[in-house]
Amino acid sequence: MSDKRLTNLTVYEKAQLVSGGGFWSTRGFEKKGVKPIKTSDGPAGLRVQAENRSDSMGLNSSVPATVFPAHSSLACSFDKRLVNAAARAIGEEARSFGVDILLAPAVNIKRNPLCGRNFEYFSEDEYLSGALGAEYIKGLQSTGVGACVKHFAANNKEYGRTVSDSVVDGRTLNEIYLTPFETCVKEAGPRAVMTAYNRLNGTFCNENTALIRDILRGQWGFDGLVISDWGGTHDRVAAIKAGADLEMPGCKFSVGEIVAAVEDGRLTEAELDECAERVIRATDLKITRKECDFGEHAAFAVECAENCAVLLKNDGVLPLDKSKTVAVIGEYAKKPVYQGGGSSHVNYTDLTNIYDCVKREYRVVGYARGYRKKSTAKRLISRAVKLAKSADVVILCAGLSASDAEGSDRKNLSLPENQLALISAVCAVGKPVVCVLSCGGAVDCPFDGGVNALLFAGLNGQGGGKAVCNILSGKVNPSGKLAEGFPADINAVESTANFNESPYYTVYREGMNVGYKGNAEYKYPFGYGLSYTSFGYSDLCVMDNGVSFVLTNTGGRDGAEAVQLYIIYPEEARSGMRLKGFEKVFLRSGESRRVDIPFDGYSFRSYDGALGKWRVVTGEYELCVGSSSRDIQLRQKTFKTGDISGVTAAKTENPAPAEYALSRDKRGRVKAELSTPFSELHASRALLVRLFVKAALGLFKNNPTVGGTMHYITLRSAAQFARFNTVQAQGFIDAFNGRYLRGAVKMLMIGPEKIGRKKK
Ligand code: BGC
């Protein structure tokens, strides 16, 4: 035991220390030299809440803070410097509120476009996610605020996220799903890692020794803090054994569980000390508050959004001619869709919208709402059509308002019917139509043949309205590229077939066929994005330490290009084509520059599932430089002598895992236990419980975040969020088993941990 303060703490105090304090903070033992620390979400901005109005679903308000583009948009910048600077600004705001650890970045892979939380993640690609995640961490930690990279690991859907088992073969897991975390840990040294809610290959991530002890700490050398996701603990004793240091939010009854386990020998004090010591070390890095300039950040949020927008189509209508009269159509022009729902929700400081900004630049003939959430009011469409006829050009704002949300997944990639009807009616008028899409991920664009320009604004934060206007007017050249492809048909994407096969498991049968690495066709592929200028690629040189080539701005405007290096692996490596480098290069019109993209430790490696090791396959590698995954401009082969002649393919025939264990009586009725998911109690033995569950789920059926989360939240998490102590938690379970009176009496026993034993 190296820290003297640890020796001064009793077992009971150490149990308290690793069991969190409040909703966002840890417990301090000031007299013994251990300070409390404060955490906050993340990732698109700061979400500091009052302790008595705290939640992990973005329900209650938080302090005003700058809303930066969501990770999904930020990634489209393909710009490491920008991501670093955005995270630094978020860090400065966190520091001004005394936040010690920000719960960001989120580097899970967008395995399938339907995942409701994709907007919070960078990309479908592990290299891009890792590189940008690492920059985010460096920028954030440069302010002294610690980063907590999340959600470790294979958390790729929201349906049943708190109980689901991600069944992934070793090769796929390491190559695709762990690599972004590995890059973050090794290249940027985050202060903390948050374990995911789900199980991985049978064991909850927060209790997963293979994941935490063997891979994270053993292989990658991480010696920072491992924090549970909020309510993501199932067995606290097993979690400590696996090396999960801190349970969040504060859980009173865990304290009793830990003390009892030490007393009866299921947990050694040394195991508890290991976690407690890491918590103490994290609390030593307490932040010193410092004011920051929110006005400057608001301006920078606009710059970020400008770099993130992706121009998908342009027949020449953009940039918009200043002499044209403009009709602005679509509710989202005035009520912007600029961030997703759930724990990443930020309370903006200065919100811009497209309508106000366009009005400052153009002669706007009018605004028509065009659609209303869930309403197909035909008169809204007729008014929009009438307005379109009176203008030279139409700006039509469309998107998704509620489906980019934590807690639930999308059912399809379609825009709402009323918006599709509006777009086709407005296009039929015959005036040029510029469509702006605001949403957190890929959507079907059956209308893109009819519109003259299509700009994917994404979820671009509070500065989004101004940024879009600057792009439409040509003040800024669009330079974003898609960090997630838009599939031509979602059903052809390999993971769609088993995306939501069960709330209790997902078998990753598609193996490494994720995004552009798969066989599906993409309407707008990964890495794709147009510009108002054009770029020429020439003179590729392949060296031992990287590639270099000449990029020329061959068009009439200044602008930036996100250049991409892909490597096609030899057949024996069974990897296909992979992104292995990228740079964002700004060039004046006519300017040329030599661009270098170095190789790194991730460039040529292949994971052999049978050996359980990284190897370099000997063979011919093709180096491809291009402007997207489907537009390679320069290519050259090179031979590499590695340490193996080939690796085994991903084993995609994983068996379906066992059903989630539920306790039942002889008649098959569910007996409530701490591990029981809430909605399973629809089959409870107690009539009142059945009615209650039905009513509660019905109440939130239109709220995807709360409703979706509630279905599969375990009773343990619910008791934890309710801040129950040990006796109350028992009462909670009694009540759910129909022993209402006994349960109610116990639940009234408010107090501290109530461990039911003598305090040690
Ligand atoms: C989310 C985390 C978040 C935490 C705290 C959880 O529901 O999964 O990403 O950091 O809540 O709000």
Image (tube, rainbow, N blue to C red):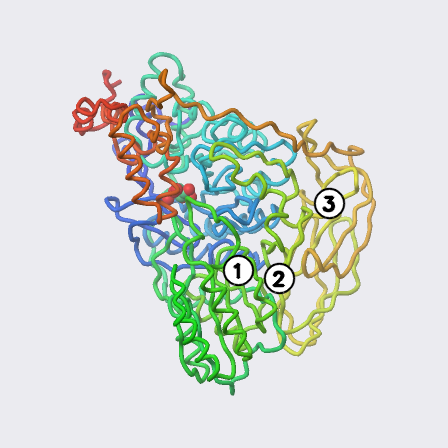
Which labelled disc corresponds to residue 259? none
Which circle's residue, 2 or 3, is located before the other in the chain?
A: 3
Residue at point 27% right, 23% down?
Answer: 737
Residues under numbered marks 2 and 1 in contact, where contact means CB atoms less than 8 Å apart = yes
- Circle 1 SS class: helix
Q: Say which of 592 and 446 sits in front.
A: 446
Asked whether mark 1 lies closer than 8 Å to ligand 1, one says no
Q: CA distance from mark 3 to mark 1?
A: 30 Å
Locate residue 170: give its quadrant: top right
Q: Residues within 10 Å of mark 1 (few under 14, many from 20)?
A: many
- Circle 3 SS class: loop
Give the total of numbered labels: 3
Residue 520 in sight: yes
Whole-percent x, y for residue 360 in the image: 42, 80
Q: Amino acid at mark 3?
A: Gly
Which residue is labeled 3 in the image?
576
Which circle's residue, 3 or 1, is located before the other in the chain?
A: 1
Pick the quarter of the image with the C terminus: top left
Locate residue 711: give its quadrant: top left
Q: Amino acid at mark 2?
A: Lys
Residue 459 in sight: no
**Residue farthest bottom in this picture:** 323
Which residue is labeled 1 in the image?
82
Whole-percent x, y for residue 118 in the image: 50, 49
Q: Residues within 10 Å of mark 3 (few under 14, many from 20)?
A: some
Asked whether mark 2 lies closer than 8 Å to ligand 1, one says no
Q: Amino acid at mark 1?
A: Leu
Q: Quadrant of ligand 1?
A: top left
Pick the quarter of the image with the N terminus: top left
Which circle's residue, 2 or 1, is located before the other in the chain?
A: 1
